[in-house]
Amino acid sequence: MQTAIELNTDKLDGRLEEGLKRLFPHRKICVVAYDLTEASQPDETEYLLSDPERRERILRAVEDVRAGRNLVTPDQSLFT
């Protein structure tokens, strides 16, 4: 199970810990926190392009789409 919790640190009062204990009883969990202000949100594009192999694959796919190469068109009747 996975859950995301957004909160203001000014309102932390101990309920978060109790809520986590109820959601994940007797479990080992990972809590990750980052600032949700617009300027500091994680950049997914930056992350995706950070791995050299993945970067090359993504950029090659972008080139293919722009050139109309290696495209797969699904059976459109499935979407009507």
Image (tube, rainbow, N blue to C red):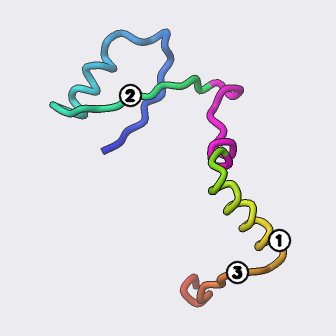
Residue located 20% across and 33% down the image: 27
Whichever of callouts 2 and 3 sits on the residue coming sooner in the sequence is: 2
In the image, residue 64 above or below residue 21? below
- The circle on residue 31 is 2
Q: Which residue is mark 1?
A: 66
Residue 40 figure quarter: top right
Dot 2: within a 10 Å radius of its alpha carbon, few (fewer than 14), some, or many (20 or more) residues? Answer: few
Whichever of callouts 1 and 3 sits on the residue coming sooner in the sequence is: 1
Instruction: Provide the residue span drawn in magenta.
Output: 37-49
Q: Which residue is mark 3?
A: 71
Q: Position of residue 35 (x, y in %)?
A: 58, 23
Number of callouts: 3
Residue farthest front in this picture: 52
Residue 79 figure quarter: bottom right
Q: Give the position of the N terminus as an image quadrant.
A: top left
Residue located 44% across and 28% down the image: 32
Q: Look at label 3 and name its amino acid.
A: Leu
